[in-house]
Each structure stands twice: as C-alpha cells, then as structure tokens.
Amino acid sequence: MRFLTPLAALVLLAAPAAAQNASTAGAIELYPTMQAVGVRLAYTGDANLNATAHIEWRVQGAATWQIGVDMTRITNSRWAGSVLWLDPGTAYDVRAVITDPDGGGATAGTVRTRPEPVATAATRTWWVATDGSDAAAGDATHPLATLQAAANLAQPGEEIRVRPGIYYQTLDTPRAGTAASPITLVADAPGVRVDGSDPAMLQRSDWQSEGGGIYSVPYAGSTLLVCADSLQRLYHQADLTALQSNGNGVAQGFTIAGGRLYAKLEDGSSPNGHVMHVARYQDGFYIQNDDWTVGGFEMRYFGSASGGAAIHVNNASGTWIWGNTTLAIGGKGIWLRGNSNDNLVERNLCVDPRISTWPWAAGKNHDEEIQGISAYSRRGNVIRFNTCRGTFDGIDGGDTATENDGADMDIHDNYVTQVADDALEIELFDGINCRVWHNRVDNVYSGFSISPNYVGPMYVLYNVITNYRRGGFKFSISSTGETWICHNTLASNVSGAGCVHPSGPYSNKHFRNNVMWATGVTTVDDAAGQSGTGCDFDGDLHYANFFVLFRWKGIDYATLAALHSATGFETNGRTGDALFASAVTGDYSLLAGSPAIDAALRMPGINDRFNGAAPDIGAIESGGGPDVIAPA
C-alpha cells in the first residue's frame, strides 16, 4: 500500500477549495437600448466571495478598451452592470472582467445599440375623418368614420391617418406589425382629439337639485371620471354622505348611488349649462400587438373602470408612442404593462387639472392615485423627453415580482412638476440595470421614491430635483437593492424638506458626488434609523441652513468631520453653498468659485466626460459640458 506524504495530502485537500475559490467567467448577456447596454455575466467559483468585477467596452474593432463601471453581484451566481452614454445604432465590444486573488477571468461579446426610430414610408394610407363612413373605401377622398374600422384593415407597413376633430371612440389593435414594417396610427394635423366621455351626458339639462350644491341625474352606468367644462375634474367621493360633507377635505366631487349620478361643482352651480364629461370607456388605445407606432393625438376622459389608461400597451413590444397629450384620465396616461419589451415612450405630455390641488390624503390609496406614465413591464423600455404635470405621481415603474420587471430600462430627460406625491417612483422589485438620468423635477411632494428595489444595480445619475415639500429621495419597504445615486443636484426652498428622507428600512444605497442643499433641516434625515447595512456617502457637497448638517441612525452630526469619524462616510465630502446661478429662476448651474467645481470623485463609466481638472459635483457640469442634456 502506498502512503501520501503530509505535504502531498495537504496539496490534494487544498486543490478542491482553491478551485472553488477561483472565479471562472461564464456566458455574457448584453441587452441594448439606444444609449446603454445592460450586462450580465455568469460565473462559477468564488466560494469565499472575494472577487470583484468591472466592465470594459469599445466601439467594435477599436484599439483601446474603455474602463466602465464596477459590477454588482446579483442572484444565481452572476455579475451585472451597465455601459452608459453610448451612441444609437452603433456596434460595441463589451467584456466583463472578474478580478479575484484566487484566479479571475473575463468574457467578451459584441452588441449593437438600438437605432433611433425613423418613420417609414407607408405602403398604404387608411384615412379617418369625422364626416367619413365605415362603408367607404378609406382613401383620402372617401375616409372611414372610426378608428377601429381602420385598425381592422391596416396591415404591416401601412398607416392610419386621422384628420382633426373629436372622436368619441376607442381602438383595440387586431394584429401586429413587424420591426421593419410597423403599423402606424398618426394624427394628420393638430386638433385630433380621442375622447372617452359619453356624448349623451355632455349637455344634459335634467340635473335636479338635491340641496347643498349637489345635483343629480338618472345614470345606469359606472365610471371613475367626471369632469365639468374640460378642466374641473371632480373627486370621486365614497358615497352621498361624503359628497355632502366634503369628504377627504375636497369641497366638490361626484358619486353614484341608487341609479343616479350626483355631482357637486366647485362653485355650487348646477351642471345644467356646463359640459359634463363622464368617462364611458376604460382605455383609449389598447395596444396588445407588437410594432405599432402611435403619435400626435390628444387623449381625454378615459378611465371608466380600474386599470384604464389613455394609451395602454399590454404584452406588446417594439411600440413607439410619441407626441401625444393625455388629459384628465381616470387611470394612467400611458401604461406599459405585462410582457412588454423594447418600447419607446417619448415627447408626450400627461396632465391632470386638479389632482395636485387636493390634499395628499385625498389621493393616496384612492381612485385618483394615478400616474402620468407607468411601466409595469419588462426589459429595454425607454421613457424619455416627456412632461408630466398635475397627476398624483409622475412616472413610475415596477410592481411585479419577476426578475426582468423594469430591467435594462432607461428613464431620462423627462420633466415632472406639480405632482401630488412622487415625481418618479422607481419601485422595481429587482431593477437590474435600471437607469434613471438627466431628469428635471420641480415643485412636487417627493422627488424620487425607491421603495423598493431588491437586486439592482440601479443607476440614478445627473438628475436635478428641486423644491420638493417632503424630501428629495425616499426609501422604504426594506429596499435592499444596490443603487448608485451619483451626480444629482438636490435643493428645496421649502424649509424642513431634506435631500434624503426615508420612510422605512433600506440598505445598499451608494451616494457619490451629489449636491445636497437644505434649509431648516439636515441634508440627510435618517432620524428613526431606518438605514440598514451597505449604505455609504462620499464626494458629496452638503449645505444645510440648520444647526445640524447630517442625521444618521438617529444621531445628529454638525460637521462632516464628526460624521466621518463616527461612520467613515464622506472621506472626500465637502460642505458649503453650491453657488447656483439662479435658483429662483430654476438655473442650478454653478457660478465661478463654487466648491462643487472640479471636486467630484472620478467614477469610470459614469463621469468620464468633463471640463477642467475633474468632474464637478452635482448634475450640471460647469461650462455646459457634455454630461448635461436639457429636458424637453
């Protein structure tokens, strides 16, 4: 019998452990949008979890690799991260590199970013007009009367062109286009209104007084939306008693009881003589097939039942929703839902005329808790250059418990103002490679709500968030996902509104290079100690017109030095007034002499493009550098 020496036995015993501790790079997955690529790398080994990983990229075939972001370890033995600031329609080489003291590796791949959409020449045009007939040929001389008739006829590569007028109609897509030959639905000129209200209710003259400024008419239907004279949205009161007593602090409204519709206008006048818009349709355009283009419409008064939207994209991919206006919707303005991927929602205006004027509690958990744009959908969706004003929330994403919910999504260059609650709700269960950048938020209750994300990485970059009444960033619901919050400018003229104001437990939030300006409160107000593990701050510029600068886990810190000594935060942080050019007029660029100029930490893959000796802290590079794209 042959015996092993002690040294040989030790080598054999150590070999399996070493093999498990070393990292082996596996398959790489690359998922593009127009300006970014989501990267996921499978790996084996690294049992001792001492590896790190980062991304490198280059234009395909270029000699030099660019260093990108550090990657985040995610579920099922994978690393994830994003390549940012890319050009549309361009081929790139991307590689993910694992650095491991026990042995690392890398995997590379090639991907082409999505091109900018281009309107394709239609092979045939179907015309719709208010004076048309569905028995007509559908050409320019003999238009159809209804949108649905045209949709039923349109084939891939064809378009439906709608002339100005009011259409009390809806449309459900009956078939898909193709990526090369989409079906196009377009307004021929300004003034095409698709209206969900019931024409029979518009000018009724039989409203009878019930006393106290309340009037009623017989009504056999159900609805979640009533508006008087276009802009006076009425609050949906729970019952007649609530309507009589100005329920939830709203001194107007409507309710349905006993086969009658009761309405109370703001001035107490009779609805007789007013135009009363009562929604009879749940959705305006219901897009359930791939590759449709929809542009140029004014969508009003939809939302007769819960789950409605003016433009509702459900289990459809490759749609392009552009240049539409939604007004007073009893649901969502634009809704991406279900297994919807690679959709583009851009340059739309979503407005509500009343919700933001009502008490916050009147809208929360109520029929009026609506959003301008919602993305409860899957991968690769892009929401950009839109404006949301007056809704309860501006833009939101998430709410379904699947790995790819909201993944590889870009929300950028949007403008959100005058909303009753959160400007952006990035409430994605996993949020892998969700990117939120260059958005402008002003005059809202709360800026960004990240409540929750559970995996990440999520990137929140170069946003300007101002004049919030509660807080700039809100975290809650045990949000544990890795989130990089970098180069944002936060400042509110509302005393007591901090830049970070959590409302529940959260972990793994990384703040870098942000301007945090507050008055009457700390910049970070972790008063109840909601923060968990993995949160950190560095390179931020803090200013608080208050006796305390920073509050963390219920402990007050008057200086960054005291904060750093106790927590290790802000090794490279600064204090001082950012010296905004003109906060009163909304100009948050930096004046010469600002302590934010050339003071940011370098972050490969995030702030590679800058003026001067180093990037500036905050969202706006001094001198109008390439980091900044103005919102629509």
Image: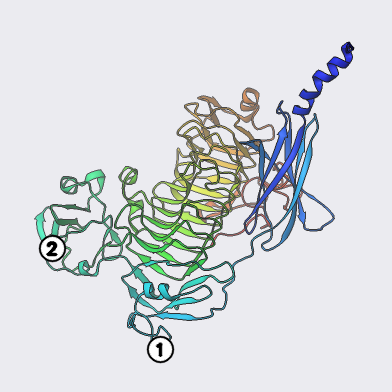
What number is the disc on residue 23?
none
Instruction: Answer with left or right where residue 76 lies relative to residue 328.
Output: right
x and y, in percent, of residue 210 in the image: 9, 55
Whether residue 606 appears in this view of the structure is: no
Identify the residue shown where x is 49% and y is 59%.
316
What number is the disc on residue 141?
1
Instruction: Answer with left or right where residue 375 lies relative to residue 511.
Output: left
Identify the residue shown where x is 51% and y is 63%.
290
Q: Residues within 10 Å of mark 1 (few under 14, many from 20)?
A: few
- Residue 265, by quadrant, is bottom left
Question: What residue is pinned by disc 2?
Answer: 207
Q: Name the N-terminal-most of marks 1 and 2.
A: 1
Q: Is residue 455 above or below residue 15?
A: below
Q: Residues within 10 Å of mark 2 (few under 14, many from 20)?
A: some
Three-letter residue code for mark 2: Trp
x and y, in percent, of residue 498 in the image: 49, 38
Looking at this rendering, what residue extends furthest in the front direction? 1
- Residue 148, by quadrant, is bottom left
x and y, in percent, of residue 338 in the image: 46, 52
Instruction: Answer with left or right where residue 193 lies relative to residue 175.
Output: left
Whether residue 22 appears in this view of the structure is: yes
Identify the residue shown where x is 58% and y is 66%.
179
x and y, in percent, of residue 1 in the image: 88, 10
Mark 1 element type: loop
Comparing labels 1 and 2, the label whose residue is closer to the camera: 1
Q: How far is mark 1 from mark 2, CA to CA?
A: 42 Å
Q: How many marks?
A: 2
Given residues 9 and 276, the one toward you in this image is: 9
Three-letter residue code for mark 1: Thr
